[in-house]
Amino acid sequence: MMFRFPLHIGLAAVVLTALAACDPAEVPTSGGPAGMRRLTEDQYRNSIADIFGPDILVAGRFDPIVRPEHGLLAAGTSEISVSPTGFEQIYTMANSIAAQVVDQSHRGTFVGCRPRDVKAADDDCATAFFRHIGRFIFRRPLTDDELKARVLASGRATRLSSDFYQGLALGLGSLLSAPDFIFDVDTTEPDPNRSGRLRLTSYAKASRLSFFLWNTTPDLELMTAAERGDLHREDSLRHQVDRLLASPRVESAVRTFFADMLGFEVIADLAKDPVLYPQFVRAVKADMPEQTLRTIVNVLLTDNGDYRDLFKTRKTFMTRALGVIYQVPVPQKDGWMPYEFPQGEPRAGILTLMNFLAAFSHDGRSSPTVRGKALREHLLCQPVPIPPGNVDFALVQNTADPAHPTTRDRLTAHRSNPTCAGCHRITDPVGLGLENFDTVGVFRTTENGATIDTSGDLDGVPFQNAADLGQAMHDNPAATSCVVNRFYEYAVRRTVVKGERDWLSSLNQQFAQDGYRVPALMRRIAISDAFYSVAPESQQPIQEAKR
Amino acid sequence: MTRVRRHTFHLGKNAQALMALSFMAMATHSTVAAPVEEGETLGFLVTQFAISIYYGDFKTDCPDGMTPTTDEAFLLTQTPSERARLLRPENALELEKKWKIDFTSGPNGEDICRNPRSFLDDPRHPVHLPVQSKISYGMNLDGNVDGSATPMTCLHDNFTGINGEAGVDNQMYRIMGCAKSWRGEGPKFGGSMAIKYNSYMKDGLHNYLIELKGVNDRRNDPDVEVGIYSTEDKSMLSGAGDHLPHQTFAITKNPRWHNVVHGRIVDGVLHTDTADAITLDWFSALNGPFGAANEYEFHRAQLRLELLPDGTLKGILGAYLPIDATSAQARNGGKGVATNGNRDCASEYKSMAVYADGFPDPKTGQCTMISMSNDVVAIPAFVLHPDPGPQKTASVEP
Amino acid sequence: MSSLKQNRRTLLRGLMGSAAVTVALPFLDCFLNANGTALASGTPLPIRFGTWFWGLGVTPGRWRPARTGSDYDILPELEAIAPYKKKVSIFSGFDVLLDGRPNFPHQTGGPAFRTGIAPARLAFPGVSFDTLIADAIGANTRFRSLELTAIAASNNTLSGRGAGQMNPSESSASALYRRVFGPDFKDPNAADFAPDPAIMAKQSVLSAVADQRHALEQRLGSADRARLDQYFTAVRQVENQLALQLQKPEPLLACKQPGAPKEIPVAHDVEDAIQNHEVLAKLLGMALTCNQTKVFNICFNDSASSLTRRGTTTSHHQLTHDEQIDEKLGYQPEATKFIADLMRALGTFVGILDGIPEGDGTLLDNSLVVAHSDTDFAKVHSVTSLPVMFAGRAGGRINAGVHIDGKGESVTRLALTAMQVMKVNADRFGSGSMETKKPVSELFAA
């Protein structure tokens, strides 16, 4: 049985065109479905810190997000709910946050009024408090019903406890336990410019924008713009986008995106054989994803560089712990210091950093197949079929077989089986280019005494070693179209729909025109119509709550 | 087979910028010729540094058995009937008080470990049972093979080295080689003291570095510079508790713990000249159970280390230890060394004093130091100098 | 559904007498008592937490099972807990990570596990996790926690909030008796019950979350509506938990004031310590049964153990360093005997808790006991693979009876697991490399 590898997926529509002198009119999309996305742990923590300040302790756990097949964790937030244990945590966190917000040291900041009697309910003061604070928690003004329910509940709680602030805290806890806070819910309204179509409300736009660019709840200025309806006006929207993009907080979004795109969640449970690879200690494991993220941020944000340079850059960062893997001296005792691999060194680009090499290898040996699969799926958006269930892996796994000393020898033998050949032709020739690095990323030239051959090819482009492979990735159009598609998926936090494909193709061309600058890509998404478009059949419009 | 790598760091404004890097060449990397006149610099972290014990046939080495521990020494001072009485379960508390308190105190309350000199005439704490065999690790430190007294030494017996070398000086082994605390469990498990000493380096209580400079040929080179240093940086250990190779360590800023000596490599073995003294940190990380920080002093010291193909250094350090400084290591621990550690500090001191074979006191003629041998193992590491002074500049810096 | 809700509201209003409140009511019918974790009425039994410390570790090759999972092998030093194997989990390969700090012999392992901080100097470096658990669950009992030791050393403790704020350990059985069952002891079954207004207030406010459900549902497609349904199912479960706390608890039928114990004088003799520990453990068992405390901390011996055996002069600690490893046996015979004694004492302790019936199970079933030492192999003071065991099922919250290999991960993962099982509101524990946000989640009962 042979598998047909769907190489065309994700890049079939990509045709690079000559740089256009000016932006063409935006290619229309069908609009995506309206939905609701559970806040990630980072988004929750960032929101609480932004609303109430970083000194409010947030201690609790979150239900894990499930990665959709060939998708991002960000898209998984559109599919998960909250488990009973998860809600127990949400509720406990909510009450603990609320108690801190109204305690002696914080109430002056957050409660704008004083109750007539601290032992009695004061509906006026409670109303003012919930109206003010509720707008930030729900990322929109509370409806009258929502507001009344909190005032009523707080009053009841105050009467039971004879403590105005305790009642207030419990009411605040109920806001923080509400699905309207825990989920980012799309709210739509009829589009006045396009009869019969829907659009996100101004507040929903603000949330979408803020979670995309800052990974947090909208700030005051964005909320004020939303309140004025400014986000429906192109110039005001651009102003807000540029303001958000100019902030150092964009780094948090870029880090979150790449940790998601590169599948960093596998690292938490990563283990290596402690006898064969004793240097894979906890400090090394802790530093390895951070090294890759720092390298990415340095190229894309600090240097505003070309995305493709991620596959070629010699600049990275080191800690003493990582020095053990790279076998280089690290003068600085604690923390990170910049480092540049010298010309002629075997390392260049994020594929040759320890994180990629170790995360996509087996416990006891490197794996060109797993590395090749990760490269295809994470960096080129090319899904690799899963192997059939009845494969005999004995040959591949026997690293002590004198007839097949290197991984290439074993895989070549394995590929002589036609059942396996189809998929391995997709993964192995790429992964073999990284065989100079063992399963924890330490450089080597031999395996079991035999010299390692690192030649291979990527979609017809031959290479001799890892540096050449980096160049081939740099030149591969699927690499850039992949990051464009992923960034959009990350921005809308759902799976991309068919009606958005043409627009993504045009976005891909614009990415090239922008010199593959990622901040420019983020800006194009953030100011596009596509980003805010809602498919008409997905939801009935309702009137936005009136204040 | 080796090469020198250039490492490019963007050094910031911080003080680290002053550090001169020294480089350890990578045995596994492809060849790039190093400048012949300067040679390569090899850095190492010391992973084993503890007394050498030669395990021959036990009955030959220690025909009279092991030297008594503190509690055993106490019981030997008692009559057989009293000994039997004290060993009865109901007298356990009395026995404990007698050996842990009375036996380890002098007439005026002197602490057996803090003031071992005051027990020199106390017959309850005799000289250790010496090793009786003729073979030992170590070096011929005094240059003669008959052990006769010289201006630098006192009359003593010599051992034959394990490779047949004549005139090996190792009086420390002679008096401690049958003591349980040093000899330990035998060759399979290593000496008790060695396990302890080597675990101190894993625990980060002190760590040592070795640096070889100007190595043009790892098999034969008549002219290399050997540095032995302390570092305050802690070593990272594997999950199994072993030191990891290729870590970076900064040499201590304390110049007392910088030691440089000339050496030569002959057939893959490094031999140093005799250093007047090698002084290293002892427990500087610790201010508590073992008292204040101390120093480890090796006089007229030589290193003989083999450069193994896997990049490690393995061999011995031969030297004279000042007996007062050596007993100070126990002294800082106080009586606990005698009770919890079960080492009779008074007997140890007396044994060292009697068997001391080096550095006679000009007035009394009594020797003040004792010959010894330490096992040394060191693995590849990057050694950073705290200050690029004239002598310390890494030779491979462009 | 709404009429049922209305009926229950009325019912509860009667229960609370004059308190003129309406509260959302639990769906008691979904509360089943399948695994002995709740009384017949549905009132949950208190879940207790304790630590049981022993000094000087285990013997290589005689404690750590070769097999992981529930089929773990019983080596000699686990024989004493073998009868309770299904209720005891073994943890190996969970390390104390020093971050370049020295490993102070006998002074690092215990405090580092308990506080998540490797000491930088010789002082208890932080807040021990048992006190965090006591803060969370011990506030409503007479004693927030009880600290005990089998040897005569009140400073033998690993429970506290930092140097100078340590919880001293009681070693005298009669002193413990006076403290718990003396004149201040009140029969818990005689106490009047009044629902806690703070819980009533919480419950009332939680209902406001659900009130807006309809408005939100209108804005969603069917798939998202199903997700919202799950959300409100979860809300209802928390409402149930609050409602249960407003009911009068069942009487503690097994609670009976014990007679005064016989005092056993202890110095360093291991047999005396074993006997004293057994008396203390029985008193503690009754203190737990009578809900006088929910948290306890036992240090059987000290970390550089001064225990001796009658007729010999050498303490356990000295033996670990000085005793020869028997080449035939592969271990130090005398030092190993002490480990066997310590493990037998742990077996006795677990057996005492498991011998007290409670609900459908035993006191042990409603407890989580974290037993641990300060070192793996005392001869070299190693703090990698700290020996840790969990005994008990914590009222069904935890999967018991497995051996898990931590593969060099931080031992604080186990502390965090215990904290989360005991409902401490914490998502992380420890500092530096020992900071973890990752409990051993396979232990959480589904």
Image: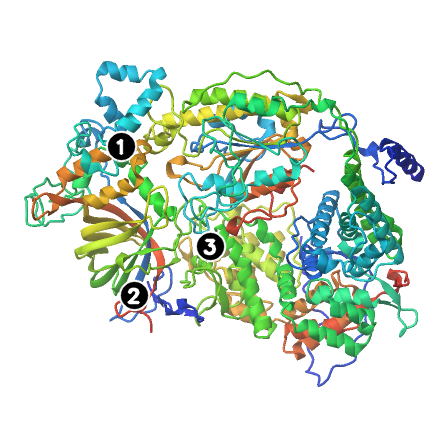
| Chain designation of label 3 | A
Residue C33 placement: quadrant = top right
Labels 1 and 2 touching (C-beta < 8 A): no
For the question of whether residue B117 can be seen, the reply is: yes
Looking at the image, which residue sits at the far bottom? A21
Of pointers 1 and 2, the one earlier in the residue sequence: 2
Q: Name the mark nearer the viewer: 1 or 2.
A: 1
Q: Position of residue B70 (x, y in %)?
A: 26, 29
Mark pair 2, 3: CA separation: 32 Å
Image quadrant for the C terminus of chain A? bottom right
Q: Position of residue C88 (x, y in %)?
A: 58, 30
| Chain designation of label 1 | B
Residue B351 placement: quadrant = top left
Question: Which mark is on residue B40?
Answer: 2
To the question of a shared chain for discs 2 and 3, the answer is: no
Q: Position of residue C366 (x, y in %)?
A: 66, 29
Q: Residues within 10 Å of mark 2 (few under 14, many from 20)?
A: many
| Chain designation of label 2 | B
Mark 1, residue position: B180
Mark 3, residue position: A406
Mark 3 is on which residue type? Thr
Labels 2 and 3 touching (C-beta < 8 A): no
Question: Which mark is on residue A30?
Answer: none
- As drawn, is B342 to the left or to the right of B169? right
- As drawn, is A336 to the left or to the right of C199? left
Q: Residues within 10 Å of mark 1 (few under 14, many from 20)?
A: many
Q: Name the mark nearer the viewer: 3 or 1.
A: 1
For the question of whether residue B188 can be seen, the reply is: no
Q: Secondary structure at mark 2?
A: strand
Mark pair 3, 1: CA separation: 50 Å
Q: Residue at x 6, y 50 (%)?
A: B151
